[in-house]
Image (tube, grey):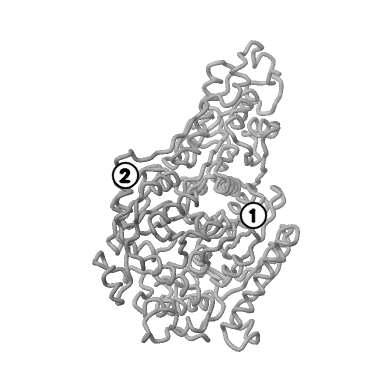
Amino acid sequence: MTAPNRNALWANALVDELVAAGVDAVVASPGSRSTPLTVAAAGHEDLRVFSQLDERSAAYFALGRARRTGRVTPLICTSGTAAANYHPAVMEASEARVPLLALTADRPPELRDSGANQTADQEKLYGDGVRFYKDLPEPAANDRVLRSLRTTVARAVATAEGADPGPVHLNVPFKKPLEPTPVPGDVPDDLPEAAERGRDGPYVDVTHGAPEPGDDKLRALATALGEADRGLIVAGPADPPGIDPESVTALAHATGFPVLADPLSGLRYGGHTRVAPVIGAYDAYLSADLADGGSDAGDAAAAGDAWADPDLVLRLGASPTSKRLRKYLAATGADQYQVDPAGRWREAEFAATDLVVAEPSRLCARLSRLVGGGSGDQGWRAQWEEADRVAEAVHAREADALDGEGGGEEDAEPAADEGDAGFHEGDALRAVAGALPDPATLFVSNSMPVRDLDRFVGPTTANVTALGNRGVSGIDGIVSSALGAGSGTTDDLTLVVGDLALYHDSNGLLAVDRCDVDVTVVAVNNDGGGIFHKLPIEEFEPPFTESFKTPHGLDFGSLAELHGLEHVRIDARPDAHADRGDTPAERADVVGEDLAAAVSRAHEATGSHLIEVDTDAEASHRTRERLAAAVDAAVHGGAAGEADE
């Protein structure tokens, strides 16, 4: 059936090509100029339309969904500031390599730079932050122009999901009428079928290739891995769709290398941890001061008087969350092979020695078949596994570990008193992680939640997909990103978020009802920017409290009521549970059990829930410091310190 006008024809062709390229959902925000696109999307039977009122939330929702699925979820908005509100998510998508496609409606060219209402310069609005940009021609019922449109849409989706995935921007101008109003003669009856209705499948079927080194280079890398006495595989946050755990496990077995897995790498949690040497607590016991700077650490370790450093590191994914790990690796002087499928640089200490342009899963699988031998130092893997065991014991408040008896030097002085180790925000992450259903999707906010997940929640065999926005690491859009991720899976969804991040994106909770996404939100409310207690500015008062910590006094119960979430409050501040145990450690266990029970009840019930955990930011940081000192004493006899914190 012929479209009622050229705008409808144009929008239908564009949406048809999205679906032909594999798109199954779009996120649309209300607006007049984008009417043709929204009507076409709503009328396509193979497309789900998520309606979001706020463009900033919409963009982060699409980002979160793509992060979970690995496939692009296009955005549709009207002209003007609507398109500008996509920009924060575009920045995150670019740096985190998440597929994103912004379809921004615009006024026709003759109205630009004319003072026309709701008209701004949208050409190359996001600058170099997108992988591909095109200002589409005005809609035309013309064979060649329609073929150009379909080709452009196919290219846009392929680029967004390509070897260097990220955001793409198509600016789409429309004249009136914007509604599907019949305009006699606007669409000719003899328009070729391929132009009006496309082909059987995508108009351009794009075949992606996986970059990999040539045979000589691959064998040379395999030889280097095989000859290393003390190698590491370090996996940072993964790019969608992730790294194959089986390939990395196979390489770890072939080489004997431990796998230091970031919580967002897709490798710290899952069934493969039963057989793979996955290490997770490294943020608790590594520092630049620990490294021997490239000397023969193996001989020193054999003599019992030093921690052994790696002589080779294979790095996968983005830069690790742990600053202490990054600084440690740089200080070791080890050869570092940075694997990146796009050939871009993602190592900000500038200590890497080699850039390997390759798809990481395929590379690991091929190397595992080529490496002969490996792990010349038989105590190498044991060193890391023992350090992880000791750190976990300290974090769990096991008395022997807290007394400095967890595996360090026999004469080490106790670095922390069990009575000092009360509940802290890292315990909240431990409690939440321990109570998750299997499978589960866990989204963690920036600032302290992702850092606490990194340090305090070790490997587990549970099928947990942990996600976060670590591209530019902002606290904006966290709620919307989590709900977008939840829309792309049947897993139960849990979001752990700080109070400022929750406040910043509180309108994102509209998606719970509008987009039919259930979520359990655990809000760690420490009344302000608790992370600033980690920084030297804490010592400068004023302006610390007013300008950095920024206490707000907000109670999120009314927010839960506004959006129809069941609300539970757990007061985890020291004074609130002083009568619930003989020691702070015992009281911490009780609070952790309360939180775990609340999370379990939320997942067993229907609907969405907001569990508000009131904490004391300063007390939490002091407890983290005491536990860090205890880990240092137990693992190193007090040698590592917190210099890189």
Residue 276, position in %: x, y?
Answer: 48, 59
Residue 319, position in %: x, y?
Answer: 41, 55
Quadrant for the C terminus, please: bottom left
Between the C-alphas of marks 1 and 2, the distance is 53 Å
Categorize mark 1 by other alpha carbons within 10 Å: few (<14), some (14-19), many (20+): some
Q: Is residue 21 left or right of residue 8?
A: left
Task: Find residue 33 and name its label.
Answer: none
Residue 243, position in %: x, y?
Answer: 48, 49
* Foreground of the two, 642 or 387: 387
Quadrant for the N terminus, please: top right
> Secondary structure beneath disc 1?
helix
Residue 200, position in %: x, y?
Answer: 61, 22
Q: Is residue 344 left or right of residue 508?
A: left
Categorize mark 2 by other alpha carbons within 10 Å: few (<14), some (14-19), many (20+): some
| Residue pointed to by mark 1 | 507
Which residue is farthest bottom? Answer: 582
Q: Amino acid at mark 2?
A: Arg
Which residue is farthest right? Answer: 606
Q: Is residue 594 left or right of residue 420?
A: right
Instruction: Work out whether mark 1 precedes mark 2 in sequence or the reverse, and give the earlier one.
Output: 2
Q: Are marks 1 and 2 in contact (CB under 8 Å)?
A: no
> Secondary structure beneath disc 2?
helix
Which residue does the image show at 44% across and 38% down from the upper left? 131
* Foreground of the two, 401 or 593: 401
Q: So how many labels did they put on this image?
A: 2
* Foreground of the two, 481 or 80: 481
Q: Amino acid at mark 1?
A: Asn
Single out the mark in the foreground, 1 or 2: 2
Which residue does the image show at 64% across and 38% down from the upper left? 31
Which residue is farthest left? Answer: 295
| Residue pointed to by mark 2 | 219
Quarter of the rendering containing residue 6: top right
